[in-house]
Image (cartoon, helix red, strand yellow):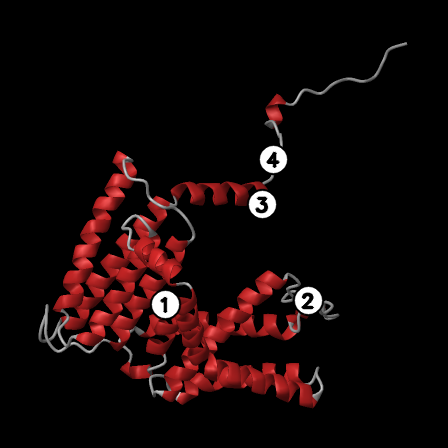
Amino acid sequence: MLLVAFQEASRGSEAEMQPHMRITVLIFFWAVVIFKLMVLLVSLPPNRPPPRNRRARRFFIADQTRLAKHLAEALAMAAVLTWWCLTDELPLHAYAPIGIGALILVVRLSLQYPPLLCLARIANGALSVAFMPFLAVARCIDYVVRHPRRVRDAVLASLHPLKAEFHALIAVIAGLLSTAFVSCTPVVVFWLMHAGFMLAAVTEKISVHRLAWRRGPGWWYAMMLAAISVYTVNAAGDFDRGFGEPDHIPQVVFCASTAWLLVFCSLGVAVNWERCLRRYRQWQQRHGTFTLTPPAHQIVRVNTEVDV
């Protein structure tokens, strides 16, 4: 959502945002970018000692899990912004600072390794990214040929409406409907039907408790897939006919997709409510403190002096 807001705010006078909102989005976005860049500059490569500078030490992260999270977010952000710049959806002057920052980070990391080894790793990474789709398809075909029964059982199990895989498949189908039709009617009706089913499911989960819903992390991945589907339909969908024609088709699609996504997330949270509470209690135990401090008027002073 931050990238979409930055894309809109970077359009300048053509943006539909109010000037104060556009300035707020730009300030917040560049603050996040500078923070990510500073973290990666002082923390990469992993297992390095903390910097000597006290100010730079504030951005240092020794935990490899947190560092990997920052690196993945930065790579995803750079990839999306680069694609937008190549497709003329983002002005060059808005992308230039990000490209310069990425170049500085790459040069700094390259200076810490021998040149030939650095070039070999860059070439290996580029080839892996280029051939990854073909390798993934080949591995999938090989697995299907070797284990047809496992694939059949997995497909049939994923079609269970009480599992996250079923709703993730619904999110994929919704994204495909937006590219298969020039009218928004099929995808909007599909969203409304699935949203009605999920509202009934949320009601059943909260009040009835008859159905055995399958809890697990798959719901979080399904919700992320639904969010990607909603973004794809709103950003790439080019509808000429349907509800709200001729002038209000984008507004209808946005409202229907947002309502569907909210109900989708509500169902995911409702199914995994016990897991959410357990994680919250774990976080509370790790970060909470407990002290016994009575009010001042209840403190009783004890005289320790002994008369001889």
Label pair 3/2, CB-CB below 8 angstroms = no
Kind of residue at badge 2 = Arg
Find residue 238 and report its horizontal and vertical position in percent: 20, 78
Q: Residues within 10 Å of mark 1 (few under 14, many from 20)?
A: few
Closer to the chain start, of discs 1 and 2, is: 1
Q: Earlier in the sequence, mark 1 or mark 4?
A: 1
Q: Amino acid at mark 1?
A: Met
Residue 290 marker: 4
User: Residue tagged by mark 3?
Assistant: 287
Q: Is residue 198 left or right of residue 80?
A: left
- Can you tell which quarter of the image residue 21 is in? bottom left
User: Is 203 drawn above or below residue 242 in the view shown?
Assistant: above
**Amino acid type, callout 3:** His
Q: Nearer the viewer, residue 306 or 98?
A: 98
Q: What distance separates the C-alpha of mark 1 from that of mark 2?
A: 30 Å
Q: Residues within 10 Å of mark 4 (few under 14, many from 20)?
A: few
Identify the image quadrant of the C terminus. top right
* Tag of residue 1: 1
Q: Position of residue 221 (x, y in %)?
A: 39, 59
Is residue 171 shown left or right of residue 114? left
Which residue is denoted by mark 2 in the rendering? 57
